[in-house]
Image (tube, rainbow, N blue to C red):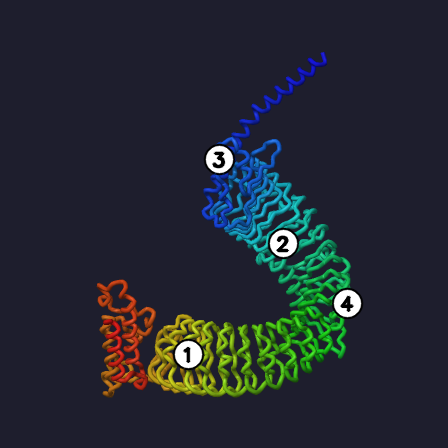
Amino acid sequence: MGGGSRRLGQCVLITACLIHAVHVLPTMCIAQSSDEQTLVAFRAAISGDPNRVLDAWVPTNGSINAVDSICRWHGVSCRSRRHPGRVTALELMSSNLMGVISPSLGNLSFLRTLNLSGNRLSGEIPPELGRLPRIRVISLGGNSLIGDVPVSLTNCVHLTHLELSRNGLHGEIPVNFSNCRELRVFNVSVNSLSGGIPPSFGSLSKLEFLGLHRCNLTGGIPTSLGNLSSLLAFDASENHNLGGIIPDTLGRLKKLNFLRFASAGLGGAIPVSLFNISSLRTLDLGNNDLSGVLPPDLGITLPRIQFLSLYSCRLKGSIPPSIGNATGLRFVQLHSNGLQGTVPPDIGRLQNLAVLNLQFNQLDDKWEKDWPLMTALGNCTGLFALSLSSNKFQGELPASVANLTAGMQQLLMNANRISGAIPPEIAKLRNLRILALAENVLTGTIPDTIGGLHSMTGLDVSGNSISGEIPPLLVANLSQLATLDLSENDLHGSIPESFERMRSIAVLDLSHNQFSGMIPKQVVGLSSLTLFLNLSHNMFSGPIPSEVGRLSSLGVLDLSNNRLSGEIPQALAACQSMEYLFLHGNQLGGRIPQSLAALKGLQHLDMSQNNLSGPIPDFLATFQYLRYLNLSYNQLDGAVPTAGVFNDTGDFFVAGNRVCGGVLELQLPKCRDRDRSEYGLGGEISVEGDVYSYGVLLLEMFTAKRPTADLFQGGTSIRSYAAMAYPDKAMEIVDQALLQNKEEDMFEKMEQCIVSVFRVALQCTEDSPRARMLTGDVIRELIAVRNNCQD
């Protein structure tokens, strides 16, 4: 009987196994086939896979090993015990994939995790993803996705993480995400959304991270968000038009570690309740139209605070001494407020402090020989940036500044009332990168010990009364210096030739001093100068060095109000990135070089108060971006152009010259017939007039247009017509009959020849007879052009 029972039990077990096998095996095969087809469709939508992460995705075509094969594909996981072989995760983050997301992914009914973040995917988020009944994680951040956030995603009731940041999404945040009661992470930061923060989010009791940074949201912060009892981090910063007030209800978020509302267009008072969230590590409300004071027990109620940023918040009152109790503080940014009083020495207890920015307040203190705050800050061994600019600190900068940590990298004390000399001991801050002491009342000389600060990238002591010469060691050793501003002091002497070692300098301002001698070619030859070079209001003499042409990337050059002489160098034509050029108030002579026609990006040009002669070049009328032109008080002659910047008398100045014509508002004398005539008829007969007529004839021949054509009315002439096209658009105005039947490989040479002819014609038709080519030179030039074209 016992044996029979055992055999019966074995039969039942075997039968059950067979039944299970009969049902499971077909299910596995069918499931595999469906998921594989979905993945194959997904791969087909990928247009680029430079890292070849999908190379192993080889279709099985229903082979018996299909289950094993699909689950071993890169990025694919099958982790369901009850349904082996079904895809539960697709994770291909940071794989450099390009293309679109296939809607077929909506068929992966067992999918729990979809992570395609950090790729280069485009197109829209497929609404079909809302059909995934088991999905918990959707991470698509860091792509180039567009379109709306699909409303269908709110059907994914088991969703715990939705990460869509750093895309190009637009539209509103669907309000029905409140259906997803399991949500812990919701991040749509850095998109172009619209509308507001749904108040319904206040019901997401498990939400831990709410990322709404830089989303273009409006409508304020709903008070209901004070119900997010599990919230750890909330970032709604840089929604510049979010508006409204900070709800007092947020003070109920007792687990909050991170709160950032900087630059969100917020107003009203800072709720006192925020300073009672003892779990806070980051509080950033900077750059809002807020008001309030720092509570006296700040350092006690926020014991864990590490990052405190309340800059530009219209704070009043003083910095409480209790701040010294918040010993975890690393970054303190309280600049641009209305804080008053002294800085409490208790701040020296913050031994983890890395950045202290208190500039642009009304803090004051008369520094004694041993300034307590400076001594106290010497205990902050991690401090690398100290900003105390634009306050009312006065007295001498004490030698105890050297007590600051050797790790100090930024020391900013601009716009105070600091007097005395710069202490040589400052060189003990051997890691200092930026030293800014501008707009104080410093005297004495620049200590050459600063030359030992080899890591220095910025030095600004402008707007003081520092005297003496520039120490040669200063510029010889500071090879990493990118910005040097010594302007508005009483410095004198010549500029050290050792400037040639400053290979990183991008901004150099030595203006408003008493420097003399010639401008060293080592300075104007620094090709690293890309932003600003200002040597104005000194006593430099001699010519402008031709090495100025090496400043090919310079944006602003100011050599005004010196004693420079000679001609404007042709080499300036190489500075084709220049937007502002100031040469006024010197003794420069000669003509304005025709080569400056290459400076097409000029916006502001001032050559006034020099001894320049000859005509006003026509090319100035072709500068598209020129908004200010001052040529007044020179010895220029001839006709004033009437195009471009010369159209508006408020944009250009030519007083104090011997010019004629131009727009009527100038009330200049009319030009003589010879100045206006295209052929030089009606005036005095001269060789220069013959050359002028020949130049006009050349223009007529090569443009197939007569000087009396209707096109040339209202002050426009055949010459100005050609000058505006020369040289880049010369082929657009040339008689097209001259270009017929020309082979393609001959076109470039033909263009060179035509441009050369126009150059000769324009030089023959300069307004001033003295500026025109000689007859012999015209013949030689045209013969050379002919020979070149015949080769």
User: Where does residue 559 sit, x and y in percent of width and height?
Assistant: 49, 81
Residue displayed at 69% across by 14% down:
5
How many angstroms separate mark 2 from mark 4 (CA)? 31 Å
Amino acid at circle 2: Asp
The three-letter amino acid code for the residue at tag 4 is Asp
How much space separates mark 1 and mark 2, taking CA atoms?
A: 53 Å
Residue with the mark numbered 4 = 346
Q: How many marks?
A: 4
Residue named by callout 3: 60
Residue 114 visible in the shown view: yes
Residue sitting at x 35%, y 84%? 614
- Which comes sooner in the sequence, label 3 or label 1? 3
Q: Position of residue 252 (x, y in %)?
A: 72, 50
At horizontal 64% and vertical 81% (from top left) the residue drawn is 448
Judged by depth in the image, the label closer to the viewer, 3 or 1, is 3
Find disc 1 in the rendering and name its residue. Answer: 571
Q: Nearer the viewer, residue 556 or 785?
A: 785
Element on which disc 1 rests: helix
Q: Quadrant of the N terminus?
A: top right
Name the residue carrying label 2: 235
